[in-house]
Amino acid sequence: MLELHDVVKRYGKTTALDGLSLRAQPGVVTGFLGPNGAGKSTALRVLVGLDRPDRGLALVRGRPYAERRAPLHEVGILLDAKAVAPRRGARPHLLALARSNGIAARRVQQVLELCGLADVADRPVGQYSLGMGQRLGIAAALLGDPPVLVLDEPVNGLDPEGIIWIRTLLRSLAAEGRTVLLSSHLMSEMALTAEDLVIVGRGRLLAQTTVDEVVARAGGGRVSVRTPEPDRLGDLLRAGGVVVATDGGDPTRLRLVGTSTDDVGRTAARHGVTLLELSAEQGSLEQAYLDLTAGVTQYRSTEVGVTAARQEAAA
Amino acid sequence: MTAVSTGVHPSVVDPSPVRQLARVVAAEWVKARSLPSTWSALGACVFILASIGPVISGMEQEGPSAPRSEPLLQMMAGVSMAQVALGVLGALVITGEYASRSITGTLAAVPQRGILLTGKAVLLVLLVTPFALLSCTLAAITSTPVLRGRGATLTLTSPEVVTAVLATTLFLVLTALLGLAVGTLLRSTAGAVVVLTGLLFLLPVLVQLVPALATSLGPWLPTQAGAAVLVLGDRSGYLSPAGGQLLVAACAGLALAAAAARLRSSDA
């Protein structure tokens, strides 16, 4: 469980976090989404005590991170995978982190193998590719076998194989009951990895929601239908207040807005209209996400799903 | 997939501050030994002290502006360069982490920043002391015969020589700690090198060129204060032996306190 409560963080005149509240639950991957500069990295830095907030509270499993004396057992962190001394090997890098938190040396070998770095563990990290650096960052995050993971843009620079590897790994870690918070600026990536979503813009919460909800919203009541009687079905639907458009390329196809496949099917059956095809149109996820962040300039905040989260907290 | 995957994650009990400090020292040892720069700085210290001592000890010193003949100062002549090497080593213990940005991972692993800095300081003392002692002992071993050849009555076991070895070792360790403090304050290797070279190496030379400064400011410079214990003859221009070492220790201590304050109050 990760929580930020009304966190304000300013760097000079820049307000990076402007009263941000969010939460990530155990057992699911929570996507932390926002355009570049939205305050994602700042929020994560505050969460793990690297930067001190000007106001507000950041809690990991009910305690401020910076109070812990062996925090790697509680939280695994990937903030900047290439932030490793370039002339040091992966093994001593991980061993130093392990020693500082009383983690057994054999665990270093375990995470090296888990992340596919065992063969290159003694090569200077400066020689690593971006993808290998990212794997080293994941290895460091897993050192303490922590119940909470905080990862900033972990798929950055990974090849397709690496992306699938990370996706599978994170979902299995969440399935074990861990809290996984994963930041990204790509909605499409989140749709494949995350279940819960926290969307931020300009340092504020725009939405605490779920991927399913955004996917549903992306549909937007758009339906596509094919019928041998497009004119007749079009008139019937128009009478019910549906927006109807013909498809230039296919005279049998109608594009409908403001209805559902259920309603179109029932209307057609009632009037004996033959349907050749009936489907809900999947809108673009990126578009739905952009719609959600479009209001950022007005500091609008739509707190979808926050009520549910509060009820859980009360329970 | 991972070692523990029970789905139940009890909170880990925090170690005591002392235990945490011991862990930090162990972690810093892993970091220090896995960087080549650590061993080149320590190697440089040994080489400089062991080789410069006998050369300077054997030099003729003539003319009105010649330095006073001080056998122990000559024996430990390498200190002025070795202290820069060790000061930079001390700085690198933390500026290296700022340069690679690995400081974020370090601070996330050890949120108690006072303990982190203390751990780095303890490791530095444990690491530098044996090498400094070796360097000074070698300087004594290589220089004593040369000095005896020039009429000095010193042997390796003379109380003056033993004191010189121990006091110079202490001075070098304190210099490394001063370097750690400067590095923590500046967060930059280049900045720390400039400040340490200026303070420890250039300033003493420049001050000697201005007679008024040489007598007023000179004794209070760390290098000259540290060397006070090596002076056997005319003590003008030097603090008392104990006073000199105390001044150096106070400098390192104050600088470390300032460094701790900065590390604790600033964002990483």
Image (spheres, grey):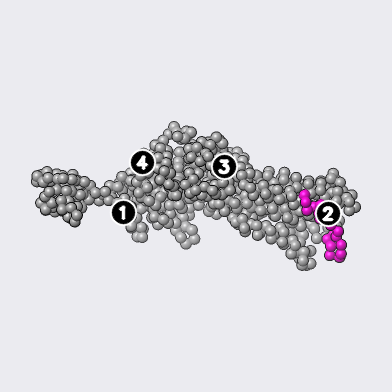
Residue with the mark numbered 2:
B57
Residue with the mark numbered 3:
A122
* Pointer 4 local density, CA inside 10 Å: few below 14, some 14–19, many at least 20: few
* Pointer 2 local density, CA inside 10 Å: few below 14, some 14–19, many at least 20: many
User: Are tags 2 and 1 found on a single chain?
Assistant: no
Chain to which mark 1 belongs: A
Chain to which mark 4 belongs: A
Residue with the mark numbered 4:
A312
The residue under the point 81% across, 55% down is B56
Label 4 close to label 1 by CB (< 8 Å): no
Chain to which mark 3 belongs: A
What is the x, y in percent for residue B249? 71, 51
What is the x, y in percent for residue A75? 48, 42
Secondary structure beneath label 3: loop
* Pointer 1 local density, CA inside 10 Å: few below 14, some 14–19, many at least 20: few
Q: Which residues are magenta?
A: B50-68
**Residue B105 shows in this picture:** yes
Ranked by sequence position, the earlier of labels 4 and 1 is 1
Q: CA distance from mark 4 to mark 1?
A: 30 Å
Q: CA distance from mark 4 to mark 3?
A: 46 Å
Secondary structure beneath label 1: helix
Looking at the picture, tell me which residue is in the foreground, A217 or B265.
Answer: A217
Q: Nearer the viewer, mark 4 or mark 1?
A: 1
How many numbered marks does the figure carry? 4
Amino acid residing under circle 2: Ser
